[in-house]
Image: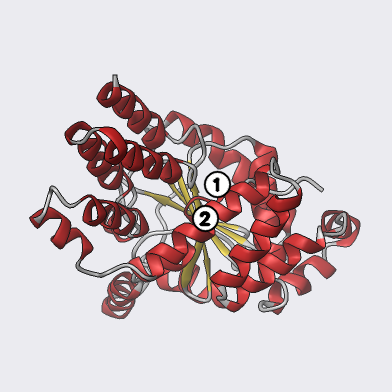
Amino acid sequence: MTRPDPRQQSAAALSAAFSGAVDLSAVKARAEAARQAAAQPAPAAGEAVPAPGSAVVDVTEANFQQEVVERSMQVPVVVDLWATWCGPCKQLSPVLERLAAEGRGAWMLAKIDVDANPRIAQLFRVQSVPTVIAIAGGQPIDAFSGALPEPQVRQWIQALLDALREQMPGIRAAEEGGGAEGAEVAAEVPEDPRFVVAEEALERGDLAAAEDAYRKILDVEPNNADAKAALAQVRFELRAAAADPTAVQRADGHPEDVDAQLAAADAEIASQRVEEGFQRLVGVVKRTSGDERNRVREHLVGLFDLFPADDPRVIAARRALASALF
């Protein structure tokens, strides 16, 4: 079985930290106020109106509560944050729309124009478009950035459904009503039991057990790319979970303290301030030498491994690191 690249789940590996960093209550409150302030206006002539239960819907602050938060209590809602000027968005959005139609209600696609809805974009701390975020139970649980190829998007969606199927009966109900196509999508090669052990530990929130499970896979298969990427993610989450909430403040006050700078970079990555975290460590590389510089470089390269290699933030930071080193 070809497993989805854990790094393509962007923010996926950082889901615990990401969920804590994103508070939907502000948009929910504004949406509720908007709904109570006035009746729904009649649509303009020629304006498309999503049918109830449609697999694809255009979302604004006014209908965010209903179309994203409330629907995500039944099935996952995949939020597509896009812009009219964005070329990659024009490649990715049709793929998502096609897959949503194929899903027949097992998940819903919510399309949000970031220019028309800047406060929603700010809520999700969107740094580039397209950005895709999965919402379940009213909380962000997974994400990726950039226009991924359709096979990888399909894998990401399938992994999302597999992870949530037992907790969200609406998924199974939609799939069972989907006929032969739904059955074909559900058919999977059996999971590698070693990964199942690790993933079950993650579901329990036992990061130490997950780390141990992935390490055991690498003891036998040192070049297993999936296990390597997953182990890097888990180790980062362990560091993030133990991080001092004042790490950034402490590091800013003590620029010579390498340990403080490493901890602060982790904290910035965990709170989705990816570029700031990368830039911090590139700056430390410029200021240090010898073993200290090498230690910081290795830490930064480890953070790169949390993201797809073609992530523009990683590409820019790698160039900056090369310039700092040479």
Q: Residue furthest top?
A: 326
* Circle 2 Cα neighbour tier, 10 Å, few/some/many (<14 / 14–19 / ≥20): many
Quick check: 185 above or below 296? Answer: below
Name which quarter of the figure residue 125 lies in.
Answer: bottom left
> Can you identify the residue that label 1 sits on?
7
Cα–Cα gap, marks 1 and 2: 8 Å
The image quadrant that residue 53 belongs to is: bottom right
Residue visible at 8% across and 56% down in the picture: 253
Residue at the extreme front of the image, as rendered: 291
Q: Are marks 1 and 2 in contact (CB under 8 Å)?
A: yes
The residue under the point 55% across, 70% down is 207
Q: Amino acid at mark 2?
A: Gln
Q: Position of residue 64 (x, y in %)?
A: 41, 67
- Give the structural element (helix, strand or loop) at label 1: helix
The vertical placement of 88 against 121, above or below, is above
In the rendered structure, the answer to whether residue 291 lies left or right of residue 255 reads: right
The amino acid at mark 1 is Arg
Where is the C terminus found, in terms of image quarters? top left
Which residue is at 46% across, 68% downward? 16
Given residues 69 and 101, the one toward you in this image is 69
Q: Is residue 254 left or right of residue 223?
A: left
Q: For the residue labelled by badge 2, is the local secondary structure a helix, a strand or a loop? A: helix
Query: Circle 1: is it few (<14), some (14-19), or many (20+) Cα within 10 Å?
Result: many
Front-most of residues 2 and 134 = 2
Q: Nearer the viewer, residue 260 or 202?
A: 260
From this viewpoint, is residue 261 visible?
Answer: yes
Image coordinates for residue 221, horizontal then vertical, percent: 74, 46
Q: Which residue is mark 2?
A: 233
State how many labels appear. 2
